[in-house]
Amino acid sequence: MQFAQRLQNVETSAIREIFKLLSTPGIISFAGGFPDAALFDVEGINEASQRALSQHPALALQYGPTEGYMPLRAQIADGMREQGSDVQATQLMVTTGSQQALDLLGKTMLSPGDKVLVEGPTFLATIQCFRLYGAEVVSVPIDQDGVQVDLLEAQIQQHKPKLIYLIPTFGNPSGAMLTLERRKRILELAAQYKVLVVEDNPYGELYFDAPPPPTLLALSAQVPGSREWLAYCGSFSKVVSPGLRLGWIVAPDALLANAAMCKQFSDANSSMLAQVTASEYLAGGRLPQALARVQKVYASRAKLMMDTLNQELGDALHYTAPQGGMFIWASLTGAGGRNRDAAAFVKRGIEHGVAAVPGAPFFATDIDHSTFRMSYASVPEEKIIEGVKRLAKAL
Amino acid sequence: MQFAQRLQNVETSAIREIFKLLSTPGIISFAGGFPDAALFDVEGINEASQRALSQHPALALQYGPTEGYMPLRAQIADGMREQGSDVQATQLMVTTGSQQALDLLGKTMLSPGDKVLVEGPTFLATIQCFRLYGAEVVSVPIDQDGVQVDLLEAQIQQHKPKLIYLIPTFGNPSGAMLTLERRKRILELAAQYKVLVVEDNPYGELYFDAPPPPTLLALSAQVPGSREWLAYCGSFSKVVSPGLRLGWIVAPDALLANAAMCKQFSDANSSMLAQVTASEYLAGGRLPQALARVQKVYASRAKLMMDTLNQELGDALHYTAPQGGMFIWASLTGAGGRNRDAAAFVKRGIEHGVAAVPGAPFFATDIDHSTFRMSYASVPEEKIIEGVKRLAKAL
């Protein structure tokens, strides 16, 4: 059987290898990217689901509008306005997880051969998603303050990209947080070069101490002409539950209309059972408390992991200290620089009973082989300590 | 903003026009394609959802495998085996509605310029879905016994299609049912010409009197070499609930693996809340009773609509008498043949307070303008009678 040509653009073996690692028995896994299921507000979601099915059964069990359940769209817009973004319900569409928002952006925007700029490193499913639409994905270097804006501008000039994809706040895998100054500069670049910037923000609410700077979307009000070149992807997965499989996208009208047309032929609409349940959950007012609990636990685990890394591995590792999110991004130090083989180190770690994710697949181009990703989000404290000790033995 | 080239392949105005019609106030609508929400087993689904969230919260609220929740895959496979198809759980993948199964088939199989053969008429979202992947979609004429296999073979020879998409049982919009003989012949053609046949079967269980012939999938066991050229799409939407947004695809191993890879970057996985709920619902054993109720009501409404059409419109219409499903496919008779303007007739109908769907958008090529589609599925009996009377006045 002959498959579509676009499949030749993606390399999945690296990804498969990673996920195979996770099922090794007895292992302490820092490799996951999932939120901690023990922190889900099961009772609240169960109550919401029962309200959805008892009070709105004909809505919750029927097909729905492609753009989403209007009360939920309004609640999402309300929440974004509270966080400083001027968003109306009709300016956003509910998606089947924020992964679908990325897929619809690819389908709507990308023709074969188009260039896309991403952070190096970035979410690997984004790289593959856009490659499936024929895009050539190019990495722009980042540091702990996020993407390096001067290099970004140079790459814009060189590649004339169709879009720029960024996770400005607590990036996956980088944990980096883009500074306020850089955020504003990126919006200026979007307006100046008339290039679409996609702000993916699944982790923004998972801050530990101080809230992060305003989103690009919120800041766009201060940068004339930038809002029309900005799309924003949000998600219920990291705070409420990935099981609902709901995210959303805010985008300029014409882009949103075309993305909705594409969604009509992708999955018609996102689960109305999930959407009405999410709407009832938000209406129930339990989210702030659930969020506070997640923030507290992740902050404590992150601190413990960093303290233990400092104690057990010292200078052998360099890592970005996250101020929120779910990830610590580390690199091996010493001779060899970017060619130090973190994949081999991760393999040794598995032999010692601890798993992480090698960093190479997170780079679209210009791979830093010395890197790897660890998540503390779902790991109990005693396992964080033991896992880091095992890592030290592997080193 | 410049959008992807692929958007130029789709024509959405016709579809938008159709859906605008549905919101005219006071209208009796035969235009819908939705199942009747009053027939959903709300109590059973609510109980299943509560069981999912109380007994399996960490599964129902977490990310899940891209291929689907294994117990649900096993239950679907069991159900298909009971209906005569040799299917194992690992040979199918759960999708976000069967619309996503079509999208993944397009993504996995179709390169720009590839040909796809479909029934004329067929499900219009399939036409647009495949066109978004650059396919050239060609209609093959059907009659009340389904696609005309001699013409199909000629088109295979002429176009060398990448795939053939069929709704063999109670087609949308045609209501037609492919005969046993033609089913076998199509499987022979698949094996002979090594062309993928996609059997979309959302309506097969909605039969009125006798069950339909076995599916292509079930019959493939009798036609050597055909199974490896066959994909099958199933759905929970027409019998259980579209609100779950769950369907599935059975396909040869290599195709299924590539479709799963594509799904990973489309929406990662279908809602686990929906999947665990569906699994608990199937385990609860209430489906046969719910199905029997839907069958009985739809059969009664279909018969009433046909009787009233015969009485009120007589020879002015020709229609295919459905033996199941949700649709009556009609054409205007008299001078003008395929050029009689059913769209104008539908407009007059709306002025008289009754809506149907003009048939033209259901044809990929070779449009029969004299056709239109009526659904009886969600219309109470007194409104069926009154609606048909209004149609007669409009004529």
Image (cartoon, coloured by chain):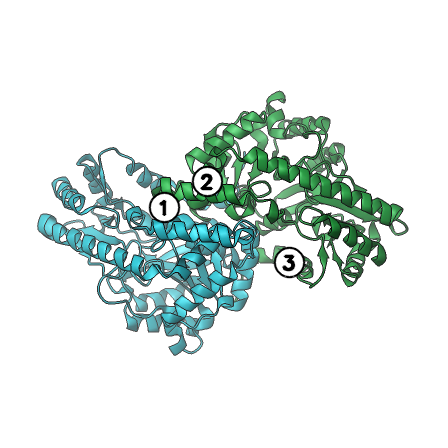
Chain colours: A green, B cyan
Position of residue B335 measured from the top left corner of the image (x, y, whole percent): 14, 49
Which residue was labeled with disc 1?
A: A62
- Mark 3 residue type: Thr
Judge depth for marks 1 and 2 and give the one in front. 1
Judge depth for marks 3 and 1 and give the one in front. 1
- Is residue B247 depicted above or below A186 in this figure? below
* Chain identifier of the residue bearing label 3 in the image: A
Q: Secondary structure at mark 1?
A: loop
Please say if the residues under marks 2 and 3 sit with CB atoms less than 8 Å apart.
no
- Mark 2 residue type: Ala
On whether disc 1 and disc 2 are found on a single subunit, the reply is: yes
Q: Is A232 or A137 nearer to us in this picture? A: A232
Q: CA distance from mark 3 to mark 1?
A: 36 Å
Position of residue A306 measured from the top left corner of the image (x, y, whole percent): 79, 43
Which residue was labeled with disc 2?
A: A260
Mark closer to the chain start, 2 or 3: 3
Which residue was labeled with disc 3?
A: A12
Q: CA distance from mark 1 to mark 2?
A: 19 Å
Q: CA distance from mark 2 to mark 3?
A: 28 Å
Tell me the crowding category of disc 2: few under 14, some 14 to 19, or many 20 or more residues within 10 angstroms, Cα based.
many
